[in-house]
Image (cartoon, helix red, strand yellow):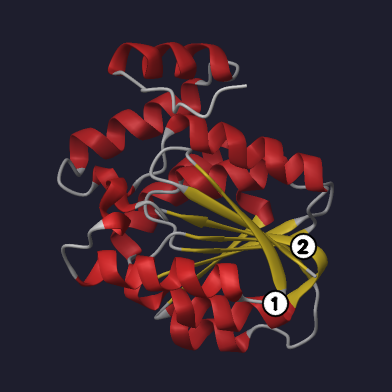
Amino acid sequence: MTTKPLPLTPELHAYLVAHGSTPDEVVRDLAEETLAALPGEAVMQVAPEQAAFLTFLTRLLGVRQAVEVGTFTGLSSLAIARGLAEGGRLTCFDISEEYTGVARRYWERAGVQDRIELRIGPAAETLRELPRERYLDFAFIDADKVGYPIYWDELVPRMRPGAVIAVDNTLRDGRVLAPRNADDRAIAAFNDAVIADVRVEAVMLPIADGVTLARVL
């Protein structure tokens, strides 16, 4: 056994993407359009290996009721929707009509638009409109970093026992070790809060920019 981390060089990452899941032209085209149309914001899109992981995880869990906070141009929501059990539903929360307009086109192209409901508005407010009972099977948080604790506190009480919350960007490109800005500090504090939250058991994975998975007890 080794505890030495594997350095993920660009070449090794390309190999991982090429061999990590079946090639998908919808994912490829969405990623390419996002990069071409929104080069400054494209970093907000999940990595291709993350998308494959989200579909795999959603299928593995047999998810029927899912929530996403932070949709952007739709790659993560597309991935989650593809993994839903028959009759499953995904509710997406975002503040941008522009970005989610791209998402809507690709949901339709992939044939998953009937599984997705998009709610536009500040998630700190719109999440409160969800039913209060514990009915959610899966949630994905990938929005403004300062808002993570708010979204977490709204979602955890609505997750059924055994449900999973996935949270993106929990390593902040390594800056959680030495935060440089408000977002870094917010994520470092959020990570501390999650690991201390007795309502969940959590594990952090070095996928892309760090993904935390929390199983609700």
Residue located 57% across and 67% down the image? 195
Q: Residues within 10 Å of mark 2 (few under 14, many from 20)?
A: many
The spot of residue 142 in percent (x, y) is: 44, 59
Q: Residues within 10 Å of mark 1 (few under 14, many from 20)?
A: few
User: Picture quarter containing residue 8?
Assistant: top left
Q: Is residue 80 above or below residue 12?
A: below
Q: Earlier in the sequence, mark 2 or mark 1?
A: 2
Mark nearest the camera among 2 and 1 is 1
Q: Is residue 16 above or below residue 210?
A: above
Q: Is residue 167 above or below residue 62?
A: below
The residue that label 1 is drawn on is 198
Q: Is residue 215 above or below residue 43?
A: below
**169 relative position to 1: left or right:** left
The residue that label 2 is drawn on is 163
Front in this rendered view, residue 199 or 65: 199
The spot of residue 181 in percent (x, y) is: 17, 67
